Amino acid sequence: MSLDPATVRRIARLARIRVEEAQLVPLGHELSGILNWIEQLNEVNIDGVEPLTGAANMALRLRPDVVSDGGDVEGVLANAPDRAGSFYAVPKVVE
Amino acid sequence: MSYAIEGRTGPWEIVVGLEVHAQAITKSKLFSGAPTAFGAEPNSQVSFVDAAFPGMLPVLNQEAVAQAVRTGLGLNAQINLVSRFDRKNYFYADLPSGYQISQYEHPIVGAGQIEIQLADGTTRQIGVTRLHLEQDAGKSLHDQHPTKSYIDLNRAGVPLMEIVSEPDIRSPEEAGAYVRKLRSILRYLGTCDGNMEEGSLRADVNVSVRKHGEPYRTRCEIKNVNSVRFVMLAIEAEAKRQIEVWEGGGTVEQETRLFDPNRGETRSMRSKEDAHDYRYFPDPDLLPVVLDEAWVAELKAALPELPDAKQARFIGDFGLSPYDAAVLVAERATADYYEAAAAGRDPKQAANWVTGDLFALLNRTGRTIEDSPVSAAALGALLGLIADNTISGKIAKQVFDIMAETGEGPAAIVEARGLRQVTDTSAIDAAVDAVLAANPDKVADYKAGKDKMFGFFVGQVMKAMAGKGNPGLVNAALKARIG
Amino acid sequence: MVFDLTLAEARAGLRRRDFSSRELTSAFNGAIAALNPTLNAFITTTPELALQQADAADVALARGEHGPLTGIPLAIKDLFCTKGIRTTAGSRILDHFVPPYESTVSANLLRDGAVFLGKANLDEFAMGSSNITSAYGPVVSPWTRNGDNRPLVPGGSSGGSAAAVAARLALGATATDTGGSIRQPASFCGIVGIKPTYGRCSRWGIVAFASSLDQAGPVARTVEDCAIMLQSMSGFDAKDSTSADLPVPDFQAACKRGVKGLRIGVPREYRSDDMPPEIETMWQQGLAWLREQGAEIVDVTLPHTKYGLATYYIVAPAEASSNLARYDGVRFSSRTDGADLNELYENTRGAGFGPEVKRRIMIGTYVLSAGYYDAYYLRAQKIRALILKDFTDVFQTVDALVTPTAPSAAFAQGEKMDDPIKMYFNDVFTVPANMSGIPGISVPAGLDAQGLPLGLQVLGRPFDEETVFAVGAAIERAAGFTAVPGMRAGAGA
């Protein structure tokens, strides 16, 4: 299996990562190399096996409904590359 | 008759399913301790978790879970004792983490149903597919700057219950009834305030059309409709558009659309170039939600009486008409008011007063029943004065208006203004005699067979008594004199 | 010479007032200033802040009010958010990020009196096994091969932490381990590193790579030093939903337990024909030491362990592709402008992430995408369940497992760089512990023929770090590993 440039472009787009046209083919080869190596997993018999999501074997703890956070506009915005008053700013989004 | 839209090729049936997003009432957000209150300064109700700062982790709010379970119980739905949170991955300016934490494969609530009542008195069951918990996104403001959008994350992470219906709805009226009923149930349960203007209840509407007996055709989703009226208008506009497309030989494309209430039409949302591929997978920061059966039972035991049960009780115990009962139970506050006012009184009379004079008063003054100028206890006391013949029904209206204006109690008003009904027969007799003496010609007419003159005499006597004469006794006295 | 003190010895010296924390900290500040330009073990140093913390520690020590780590200078992997101190995760995309909060683990260390010397270099977003992928330049191992001055890699991703500790630039360091990032660099640098059980240390405030695998732990020069550090780092944290609400045992005491009567498993699947004979020899030597100290050595089987690495390369990139979506140039990451929002995202992430991070995000995006989820991600989760079951079964009959930590000693910069999969094989022995959440320690056991350290790994039952420490300490005692790297503080070089 080899990822064609169109697939690489689609994945890059989904991941919002700029990939130059010239890189599509070599990147496709690289990714295909990894995916082909992963194919070894097809030999494992997984019939009737329940998937394991994480290593923590417990039920989720729930938090009491208490307001304990917020009210720190400066802290929230201090690292922003572009802000306007108390807002984050991004190029205009047309809906 | 079932609803249909007449096209050039004949009648079309519409098929509608609704995804209602209801904000669960909680103090803090679904996964953070930031507050959920509406209308705060931008980005002032944001924790670093909501803004998806590096290393921040979600911790689930117990009350949000309880609200979802209560809602599920209120919809007679299956409560899933094990559910799970997944990530829905997509990039958007108001989605800080690049994924929404939602429940995709294993929602907390499974199938349930809602009974809706239509204007013609019929009822229908609309299936609820599921209810799941998810985070709301932030808000983008596009009108503050010529080339920039501004982002406010106050809403980011607010708990939403997404309630998905089966495609069981067949008319705009049914859709409206469904949303109203769902809203009513949520408000009874106290799980969502149902405030559509503030966005705490909004609907995505899935619409398709078909000829009778056909399988489903392609549907379109109208996003974020924020009033019952718009839901109904949007369905009609979208159905008509689709019929035109089909009848013009075209094909309806599955897409997301927006309803423009000003133009009364739906339009395609600028397509997101490539199809969405949300790459759902279990959120590794969270573990399965496992509910304790005893806890669910506790929540169930504490549920309030819901509108359907209350309506049945009002009809059965109080002898109200289904229509009056439906009007009274639509809002829990109204039903509570009614029951308080009607306690120990004539329930039908109480219903008439609440749906008549009280509603008119609230309309006139722009008040809600929660801050009604006339309390339920005061209205009850007024009904009591009618019942024990202290005042007549007519005087009661006058007293009610004074109560609304002054806030005084009905008994005090009656005393202070001397409105107590006159039951002293000698006073009534005297008034009757005076009226008859002053109108000999009319007495003659009456005796000559003009029966309706009797009403004239009643009116004159009441007028002479400033309205306070006991109507029954006045009638009796007149009858005794002129037969 | 303070640089040759272990953390435990330095702690005793501070308490005896043999020297002050200011003296100790100044010495490390000086050593960092001298050696970091060569080793590049720190991305950010905070010498003044360290001295302030040292002075506060000295006040506490003078009053006899010391905590477990009062006055002890440490390095903090630059994946832990430190309040007011730039935190980069080794990535260009976070080169200006100053966290307004302190990670739970580093806060626990501060609570216990530690002094922070600076932020240790690492592979970008902890993705790598050689510290080559850091946007702030590679870390150079303080070790070199006999008669060969070519710079070697320190391992990764906690390469800066391991190099700093090995070169005596800190008494210990925090690290994180997603697929081996504590144990493999510890092995390469001749020091000790433990990845505790998943859930033992809070992940709150640690830049996430793969949430279901990431776990913090210490690197230090001795097993006991690691025990002291882990004691402070561990503990329940309500802010992390995967944090374990369990008491933290006395790890330092566990180091002294000995191994008499313990059953030690040797998983046969860890043997391969490609393994250098020196590593096989050292492994056998380690088992012999344990046998001599009274342990029983048992052959066991972990039939799915060989699939661990390929499974990891589905699970970890999948989680990473989602975890790293937040670096979008809007709230805290550096921005590269674009004509519209999507272009801004693509430019920001295209310029801000290095090749290995991009590769893993792409793989993760692909394996989760429509039509591939079942074939890749779901299958990987099921195999993960089988890997866990292997360990659960084996721990019915043995108390711990002993294996080599890595399939090779440290390699030179530029080696194994042509093929990502070759690099991935560094983690082949360490990854199964992350897949199953169990604790694992790497202890230096000897040198190879080129004079480079080799580590042995001890794996234990979930939340039984005590046995892991006990076995690790037994190996350490028997090995008597005293070799030191050529580049180190106090070496006079």
Image: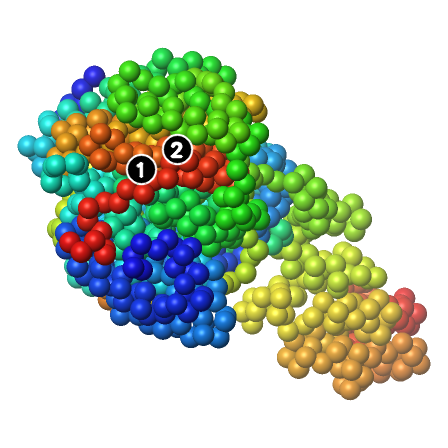
Answer above or below: position of C342 versus C96: above
Mark 1: few/some/many CA within 10 Å (<14, 14-19, 20+):
many
Residue B218: percent from the left, percent from the top? 35, 27
- Residue B180 image offset from top left, x and y in percent: 54, 48
Q: Which mark is residue C260?
A: none
**Where in the figure is residue C59, as x and y percent of width and height?**
42, 75
Dividing the image into 4 quarters, which one contains the C terminus of chain B? bottom right
- Is residue C478 shown to the viewer in this render? yes
| Chain to which mark 2 belongs | C
Residue at image point 9% right, 37% down? A20
Query: Which circle marks residue C187 in the picture?
Result: 1
- Residue under the point 57% across and 29% down: C261
* Count of marks, rendered view: 2
Alpha-carbon distance for marks 2 and 1? Answer: 9 Å
Is C266 on the left-hand or right-hand side of B109? left
- Residue linked to disc 2: C457
Front-most of B53 and B390?
B53
Colouring rule applied to residues: rainbow
Looking at the image, which residue sits at the far bottom? B416
Tell me, yes or no, whether the two marked residues, 2 and 1, touch with CB atoms within 8 Å: yes
Tag 1 secondary structure? helix
Q: Residue B102 or B354: which is nearer the viewer?
A: B102
Looking at numbered disc 1 in the image, what kind of residue is underneath it? Ser
Query: Which residue occupies the foreground of this view, B282 or B12?
Result: B282
Type of amino acid at the residue the image marks with label 2: Gln
Task: Tell me the SS state at disc 2.
Answer: strand
